Image (tube, rainbow, N blue to C red):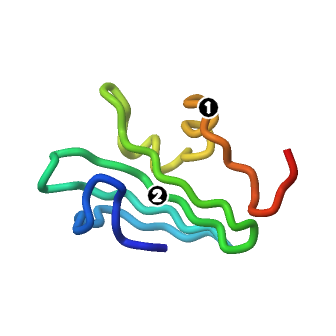
């Protein structure tokens, strides 16, 4: 997983977990004072970034990134999946 965010190339990693082929990280941008969760699943090719919104619990987003992605309408289809 790249250790950069779309809005900051040098964020601080606050938490990291790995479960099987899936890696999830919580980042904080010192420059913009924003946080985001990134997910990468090596088996499926799914990768996405979820900037935290006002009112989001950072650890809840970190623990449940697929649920937050679905709530925001973010497509999390595996690489090569047909629509």
Local secondary structure at mark 1: loop
40 versus 75 height, above or below: below
Q: Nearer the viewer, residue 7 or 13?
A: 7
Q: Quadrant of the C terminus?
A: top right
Tag in front: 2 or 1: 1
Task: Please count the marks in the image.
Answer: 2
The residue depicted at 69 percent of the width and 67 percent of the height is 45
Q: Residues within 10 Å of mark 1 (few under 14, many from 20)?
A: few
- 78 or 23: nearer the eye? 78
Whole-percent x and y of residue 22?
A: 62, 67
Residue at label 1?
Answer: 73
**Which residue sits at x=39%, y=46%?**
59
Depth check, front residue: 32 or 56: 32
Image coordinates for residue 39, horizontal then vertical, percent: 53, 59
Position of residue 2 measured from the top left corner of the image (x, y, whole percent): 43, 73
Residue linked to disc 2 = 38
Q: Residue furthest left?
A: 31
Q: CA distance from mark 2 to mark 1?
A: 16 Å
Q: Residue at x 55, y 45 (%)?
A: 64
* Left or right placement of residue 1 versus residue 13 in this view: right
Q: Is residue 21 above or below residue 65?
A: below
């Amino acid at each position: 997983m790249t250790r950069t965010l779309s809005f900051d190339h040098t964020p601080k990693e606050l938490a990291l977990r790995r479960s099987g082929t899936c890696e999830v990280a919580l980042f904080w941008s010192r420059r913009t004072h924003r946080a985001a969760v990134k997910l990468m699943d090596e088996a499926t090719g799914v990768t996405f970034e979820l900037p935290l919104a006002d009112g989001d619990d950072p650890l809840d987003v970190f623990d449940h990134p697929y649920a937050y992605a679905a709530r925001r309408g973010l497509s999390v289809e595996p690489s090569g999946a047909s629509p």
